Amino acid sequence: MTSSQQISQHQSEGDRARTMRSWRKVAYGVMLAGVIPLVATGIGTFVLGKAPMTHWVLMAHVSAAPLFAVGLALVALTWADRCRFGHGGSRRSGPTKALFWLILTCGSVVILSGVMPMTPIFGTNGQHVIYLTHRYSAIALAAAVALHLLKLKRGR
């Protein structure tokens, strides 16, 4: 027999799961809201042959960066447990999990390589290497986010 306490406990666990699912969606949305303008301004200028960015394009790029950084941190906090390899309770496939970890890795490299040039530690050659690291890790990040989103839409 099931008691009313067991039923209410089961319902509260379901409510927590739904709340967590909602937070995961919000976190992913915040990250996407930062990624989209960053891709448009960063990779867009590179593809159009207008690199490096200047004027309002650079300001838009820099303005979207904090939104991406906060979104990436929220995604890391809300998705990491379900995307661990070997996690029995996860419905995510191996490639989806791998893309998630690639997003976190590339995102961290992009953020660090965007902040490091603001320090006086690196010379001209170091600044150039950091700039190229930022560029190519951002391209890998954009591809990983697009593939991850596609995998999520197709059904895990």
Image (spheres, helix red, strand yellow):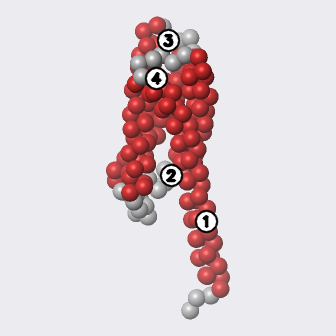
Q: Which mark is residue 79?
A: 2
Callout 3: few (<14), some (14-19), or many (20+) C-alpha neighbours within 10 Å? some
Q: Earlier in the sequence, mark 2 or mark 4?
A: 4
Q: Amino acid at mark 3?
A: Phe
- The residue shown at (38%, 34%) is 140
Q: CA distance from mark 4 to mark 3?
A: 25 Å
Query: Which comes before the other along the chain, label 4 or label 3?
Result: 4
Relative to 26, say whether 89 is above or below.
below
The residue to which callout 3 is attached is 122
Q: Which mark is residue 70?
A: none
Mark 4 or 3: in front is: 4
Q: Specify the quadrant of the image occupied by residue 23.
A: bottom right
* Amino acid type, callout 1: Arg
Local SS, label 1: helix
Closer to the chain start, of discs 3 and 2, is 2
| Residue 16 - label | 1
Q: Are marks 4 and 3 in contact (CB under 8 Å)?
A: no
- Quadrant including the C terminus: bottom left
62 over 154 or under it: above or below: above
* Residue depth check, mark 4 versus mark 1: number of the one nearer the observer: 4
Q: Earlier in the sequence, mark 1 or mark 3?
A: 1
Q: Nearer the viewer, residue 117 or 140?
A: 140
